[in-house]
Image: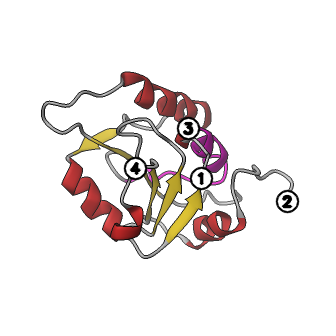
Amino acid sequence: MLKGISPLIGPDLLATLHRMGHGDEIVLADAHFPGESLNARVIRADGIKVADLLDAILPLFPLDTYVESPLIMMAPVPGDTLDPEVEKRYREVVDRHVPETPPIQRIERFAFYERAKQAFAVVMTGETAKYGNIILKKGVTPVGG
């Protein structure tokens, strides 16, 4: 254990967050996401909800300020519906840590999968909410931060 770092962030995730560079993306995936099929670097965070993991990551992780949105979620498949509470929970966490962050962008399911293939890593969580996946794009660590 380390002081100031949430116990939800294990050593593999901490090392991954540290190794990521500006513009790299990490997927916080729900329990149904095909992470192992899409990306060679998969970190397990079983039993942890995405909102809780976001709350642990965001104090350590700068979001990219040079893009339209550093947060991306999957848009619903035509005919499907979203539970607005999922994005609301994530947004509450983001606003607590980085209130100036632009709105979360939604992209089509297969476009999201393509982003996951190119992502630095996929974190498989215990999130069971439908469309509970979110991509974070890393920014630049502030000077002195």
Mark 2 or mark 4, which has the lower sequence index? Answer: 2
Q: Which mark is residue 32?
A: 4
Q: Quadrant of the C terminus?
A: bottom right
Labels 2 & 1 near each other (Cβ < 8 A): no
Structural distance between the alpha carbons of marks 2 and 4: 29 Å
Amino acid type, callout 3: Ala
Q: Earlier in the sequence, mark 4 or mark 3?
A: 4
> Horizontally, is 1 left or right of 123 in the view?
right
Give the CA separation, mark 4 to mark 3: 16 Å
Residue, disc 3: 51
Pointer 1 local density, CA inside 10 Å: few below 14, some 14–19, many at least 20? few
The one nearer the camera, 140 or 41, is: 41
Under mark 1, the amino acid is Asp
> Can you give x and y, in whole percent of width and height, for residue 17 in the image?
59, 64
Q: Nearer the viewer, residue 51 or 5?
A: 51
Which is nearer the N-term, disc 1 or disc 3? Answer: 1
Image position, residue 8 (x, y; %): 70, 50
Q: Mark 4–mark 3 contact, CB under 8 Å? A: no
Query: The magenta stretch spans which residues?
Result: 51-66
Q: CA distance from mark 1 to mark 3?
A: 13 Å
Can you identify the residue that label 1 sits on?
46
Question: First in sequence: mark 4 or mark 1?
Answer: 4
Question: How far apart, in angstroms, are the residues tagged by discs 3 and 2?
Answer: 21 Å
Residue at position x 50%, y 51% from top? 63
Q: Residues within 10 Å of mark 2 (few under 14, many from 20)?
A: few
* Label located before the other in sequence (3 or 2): 2
Label 2 – label 1 distance at C-alpha: 18 Å
Residue bearing mark 2: 1
Q: Position of residue 94 (x, y in %)?
A: 53, 36
Query: What is the x, y in percent for residue 66?
Result: 38, 53
Badge 4 amino acid: His
